[in-house]
Image: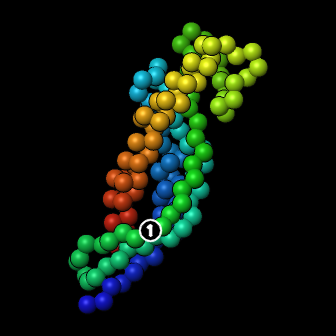
Amino acid sequence: MSWQEVNRNKWSKAFLTDLFTTASITLEGTEDAKMSFFRADVTGDCSLAMKNEGALPRPMFELKLELDWKVEQKDISSPQMRLVCDNQLPPGAGAGFKDLIDKLNEAVRKHGLPEISRMLADEFIAALKKQV
């Protein structure tokens, strides 16, 4: 029996872009901080290898996923305050501000990155296998 390869490049790019740009991840260890993605750039190849009708498809892909993300943390004492930070402390920032940034960065490492991995391993692969 020969293998048939079904191209899923267009589908994978659309699926991953939608999966991440609509996601909101609550970061444990924070006061309800949420990680979201405002850009997902997907490049590479994705296909399903199939041996015969009815056989389980085998996903094959070499994809590069670049995500631009943000974390929103509302200040409980001042809900109207909006903080935008790119890991650079603004002039005059005090120790409390640095502590908040460090706490959010740690939450992204501990809880955000594993959730991204889960989304790829579980949601993307499961949906890809259905694209026969």
- The spot of residue 87 in percent (x, y) is 65, 31
Residue at 57% from the left image edge and 53% from the top image edge: 66
Q: Amino acid at mark 1?
A: Phe
| Left-right relation of 124 to 38 | left
The quarter of the image holding the C terminus is bottom left
User: Dot 1, how many residues are within 10 Å of its Cα: few (below 14), some (14-19), or many (20+)?
Assistant: some
Residue at 69% from the left image edge and 29% from the top image edge: 88
The quarter of the image holding the N terminus is bottom left
| Left-right relation of 79 to 55 | right
- The spot of residue 125 in percent (x, y) is 36, 60
Question: SS class of the residue under badge 1?
Answer: strand
In the depicted structure, whether residue 77 falls above or below residue 112: above
In the depicted structure, whether residue 132 falls above or below residue 106: below
- The spot of residue 120 in percent (x, y) is 41, 53
The outermost residue toward the bottom is: 1
| Left-right relation of 91 to 100 | right
Residue that numbered label 1 is attached to = 61
Write down the quadrant of residue 68 in the picture: top right
Write down the quadrant of residue 48 in the picture: bottom left
The outermost residue toward the left is: 54
Inspect this view and state whether residue 129 appears: yes
Which of 130/117 is in front?
117
- The spot of residue 72 in percent (x, y) is 56, 28
